[in-house]
Amino acid sequence: MPRARPVKEPTLAGLTRRRVRALARALGDDEIDDFLEGKTVSEQAYETIFRFYDAPGEGR
């Protein structure tokens, strides 16, 4: 069973709409909503979100 990880700073700021849509395809809207609401998300969701966030061409 994947570990769940609480979210400290829930934001997708800095991601392009294209990246957010790709996240929605990868995770589903419920996981993204939980992340943005500061709820605990799965380790896979957490890693996927930050992989998209840290991708080349995305600024913080």
Image (cartoon, rainbow, N blue to C red):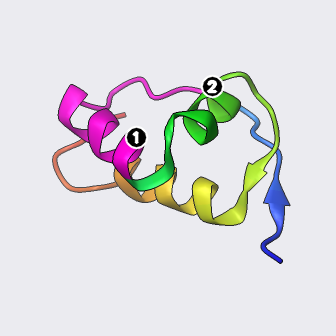
Give me the disc on residue 13: none
Give me the disc on residue 36: 2
Q: Residue at 37% across / 34% down in the picture?
A: 60
> Dividing the picture into quarters, in which one does residue 34 lie?
top right
In the image: residue 16, left or right of residue 42: left
Q: Is residue 56 above or below residue 28?
A: below
Asked whether residue 59 is in view, the answer is: no
Task: Inspect the image, locate mark 2, and give the three-letter code of the amino acid beneath it.
Answer: Leu
In the image: residue 44, left or right of residue 1: left
- Classed neighbour count for the residue bearing mark 1: other residues with Cα under 10 Å, few (<14), some (14–19), many (≥20): some
Q: Residue at 76% across / 28% down in the picture?
A: 38
Give me the disc on residue 24: 1
Asked whether residue 17 is in view, the answer is: yes
Q: Is residue 12 above or below residue 42?
A: above
SS at mark 1? helix
Marks 1/2 in contact by CB < 8 Å: the verdict is no
Q: Report x, y in % for residue 45.
A: 60, 55
Q: Residue at 20% across / 55% down in the picture?
A: 56
Q: Report x, y in % for residue 23.
A: 38, 45
For the record, the magenta segment spans 10-25
